Image (cartoon, helix red, strand yellow):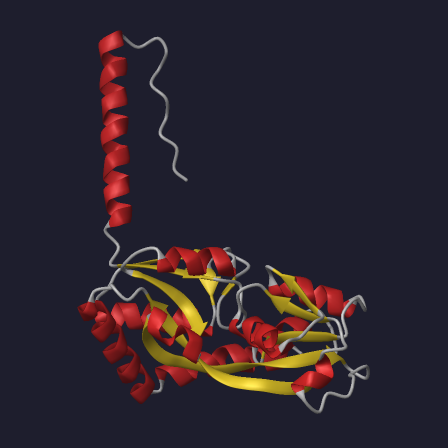
Amino acid sequence: MFRQPHPSRHAPVGARHLCRAALLVAGLGWATGAAAQDLEIVTEEYAPANFTGEDGAIAGIVTDTVRLMAERAGLSVSMEMLPFKRGYALVQGGADRCFMALWRIPAREDDFTWVGPILKDGYALFARAGEAPDVDSIEDSFGHPTGAVAGWGSTEAMQEAGHPNLEIVSLDIANMRKLAAGRLDLWLSGLLSAPWRAARQDLALERVRVVDEVDLSLACHPDTDPDTIAGLSAALQALTDEGAVQAIRARYLDTAASEN
C-alpha cells in the first residue's frame, strides 16, 4: 500500500498541522474511492474457477468471465479472496455483494439473487489412483475417512445423508495433502477443482463416484440493485453467444492439459 511520508519533525507547527490535514483529506478521498465500487465480490481458492495466481492477482475461469461481464455491463467491481465461510457470511451481510461463485443448489436458492450459470461443475469422491475403495452408493463411503470443506454444499449434503466419518477443514487443499499422505481414504471435492489441484502436485487421482453435477453461478445478496443484476445477466448471455465464455474455459483447461 502507498505510504504517505511523515511531515518533518523539524517543520514549523503550522506546517505540520497542514500536512496532517492534507493526509486526512487524502485518506478520506481514498476511502470514498473504495466505497464507489458498484459491486463487492468475494471468492475462495477454488481452482480453476478462482485462484490466486503467481503474481498475487485473482485469476481463473469464473474470475475472468465475471470481469468481462462487469466490463460489458459498465460496472466497477472489487474482488477479495477469503476462506469460504467468511466470504459467504460477508455476502449475506449486505446489498451489492456477491460470492464468486456458488453451487446453485435448492437449499441456497432463496438466499441469493443468481447470475448464471457461469460454469458447469459438481462434486465427487476421489481416491489415490489404485487405492480406491468400492463405492457403489453414497452409503458405501460411510466407513471411510472422507475429507470435506466446512460450509460447502457437498459437505452439507453428506452430513444430511448421515456420513459419520467426514473430516472437515476450512481449505480444500488441506484435504488433498491428507489424501496424498494416506490420512484419508476419500476426498470429497469439485469435479474440476480436484483433478486440477492434484495434477499440479503430481498426485495420481481416481474419481470414485460422482455425487452430483451442479452449476456454478454468481450469488448476490437479494437486496443488490436489480439493474446491476440485469446488466450482469445480459452481459453473460452476450459473452456466451459470442463464444467468449467458452474461450476462457478452454484457455485454462487446455493450458492445464498441456502442462501435464
Query: Along the line of sight, which residue is nearer the eye, 60 or 192?
Result: 192
* Quadrant in the rendering for residue 193: bottom right
- The residue positioned 35% from the left and 87% from the top of the image is 243
Q: Is residue 53 visible?
A: yes
Given the current orientation, which residue lies at the most extreme left position? Answer: 227
Q: Nearer the viewer, residue 57 or 139?
A: 139
Q: Is residue 87 above or below residue 100?
A: above
* Point 44% across, 61% down: residue: 88
Q: Position of residue 100 (x, y in %)?
A: 41, 67
Q: Is residue 242 left or right of residue 147?
A: left
Query: In the rendered image of this protein, does residue 6 appear above or below residue 212?
Result: above
Residue 204 locus on image (x, y percent): 75, 78
- Corner quadrant of residue 140: bottom right
Question: In which quadrant is the C terminus drawn?
Answer: bottom right
Image quarter where the N terminus lies is: top left
> What is the total number of numbered labels drawn onto the structure image?
0
Residue 107 sits above or below residue 136 on the image: above
* Residue at the image position 78 percent from the left and 83 percent from the top: 132
The image shows residue 56 at horizontal and vertical percentages of 50, 55
